[in-house]
Image (cartoon, rainbow, N blue to C red):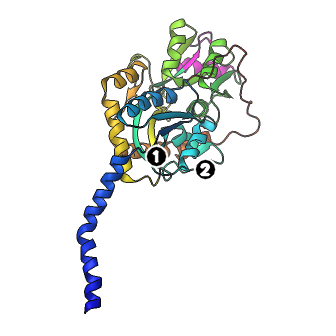
């Protein structure tokens, strides 16, 4: 009897106090976070969209915590180098990825030897912004609309070239899918950064590019690049008269890149909740929102579950059977990455 009591009493004690202890531990974990500097790993170069948004958020998060938030760049392979680093990091919330629809979307499906699963290996925190994209061509090309571009390509087979940032990039997806959907031939020329690809379009080295509208605008205003179509599902806020690709009869190309924060899978729920709450507060602050809008981006406020659903939707969209040909890794015969001219600026967005 004594043995039974000696075993039963501790059991009852822990049964009654266990939930309280667990709740207290969870609360304490969240309250103690962060316990050291937090790193946000960015997979694109300095001055890119990802870098800009990471620094905006880092400044705000660091101001709300007792620990600084540091930006660390690991560019390469369409952002998959950075994603791999974070996927293998300790799941304690102190190393985060400034994720994008490239390294957790198209690149995760098309870049060879990717060492992570975009859904299984990350814990979503929240998206930050959506980035409007458009199709632009060198203004000297004798076309003013997308149908005219397609007619020009068919009349001049093998003539058109498009700049991208290499296999796995959204720009490459746009060019290759347009080629197939429209039944035309566009040579995909990879560059090491979007800024270099845009510079090549302006110089007439290549004819066209799918990219960030904010990067195209200065050249559109200067008259060196002409916009032919919005790459989004609906018309762009700042260019309401610019038709979408779908309106031109080219379905299946919707490029609406986003950026957000994710942590390694296995990060404690309490830490994820603390991170999500901190990001939400940052995005609700007037100055951050104004800066995001000022860059021409669309702020996004959503729950981790909504972010997870968005990642899954991108994976489903990019891995659809009608897009499989556009997601194959580049093989031999593709033109090598272009080398920037001596006067080229450092990589931008």
Residue pictured at 66% horizontal, 45% vertical: 112
Q: Whole-percent x and y of residue 318?
A: 52, 42
Asked if 270 appears above or below 329 in the picture, the reply is below
Question: Where's the N terminus, which quadrant?
Answer: bottom left
Q: Is residue 205 magenta?
A: no
- Please give the residue where the numbered disc 2 appears in the rendered image: 115
Q: Whole-percent x and y of residue 182?
A: 58, 29
Q: Which residues fall within the magenta stretch?
A: 136-156
Q: Residue 263: give its label.
A: 1
Q: Whole-percent x and y of residue 323?
A: 56, 41
Task: Answer yes or no: is residue 98 visible.
Answer: no
Q: Nearer the viewer, mark 2 or mark 1?
A: 1
Residue pictured at 31% horizontal, 34% vertical: 281
Name the residue at the top extreme. 222
Asked if 43 appears above or below 56 in the picture, the reply is below
Q: Secondary structure at mark 1?
A: strand
- Label 2 or label 1, whichever comes before in sequence order: 2
Q: Secondary structure at mark 2?
A: loop
């Amino acid at each position: 009897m004594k043995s039974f009591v000696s075993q039963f009493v501790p059991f009852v004690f822990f049964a009654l106090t266990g939930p309280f202890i667990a709740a207290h531990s969870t609360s304490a974990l969240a309250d103690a976070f962060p316990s050291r500097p937090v790193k946000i790993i960015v997979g694109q170069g300095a001055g890119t969209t990802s870098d800009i948004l990471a620094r905006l958020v880092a400044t705000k998060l660091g101001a709300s915590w007792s620990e600084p938030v540091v930006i660390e760049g690991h560019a390469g392979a369409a952002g998959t180098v950075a994603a791999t680093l974070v996927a293998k990091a300790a799941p304690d919330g102190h190393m985060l990825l400034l994720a994008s629809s490239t390294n957790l979307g198209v690149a995760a499906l098309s870049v060879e030897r990717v060492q992570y699963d975009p859904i299984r290996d990350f814990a979503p925190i929240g998206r930050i912004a959506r980035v409007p994209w458009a199709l632009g061509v060198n203004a000297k090309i004798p076309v003013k609309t997308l149908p005219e571009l397609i007619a020009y390509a068919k009349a001049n087979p093998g003539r058109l070239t498009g700049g991208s940032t290499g296999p796995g990039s959204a720009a490459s997806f746009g060019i290759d899918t347009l080629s197939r959907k429209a039944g035309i031939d566009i040579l995909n020329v990879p560059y090491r950064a979007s800024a270099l690809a845009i510079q090549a379009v302006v110089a007439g080295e290549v004819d066209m590019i799918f990219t960030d509208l904010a990067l195209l605008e200065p050249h559109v205003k200067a008259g060196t690049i002409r916009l032919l179509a919005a790459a989004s599902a609906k018309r762009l806020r700042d260019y309401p008269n610019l038709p979408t690709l779908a309106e031109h009869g080219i379905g299946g190309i919707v490029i609406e890149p986003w950026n957000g924060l994710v942590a390694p899978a296995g990060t404690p729920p309490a830490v994820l909740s603390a991170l999500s709450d901190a990001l939400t507060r940052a995005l609700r602050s007037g100055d951050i929102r104004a800066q995001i809008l000022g860059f021409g981006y669309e702020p996004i406020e959503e729950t981790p579950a909504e972010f997870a659903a968005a990642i899954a939707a991108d994976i489903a969209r990019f891995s659809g059977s009608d897009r499989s040909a556009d997601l194959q890794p580049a093989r031999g015969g593709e033109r090598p990455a272009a080398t920037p001219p001596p006067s080229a600026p450092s990589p931008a967005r």
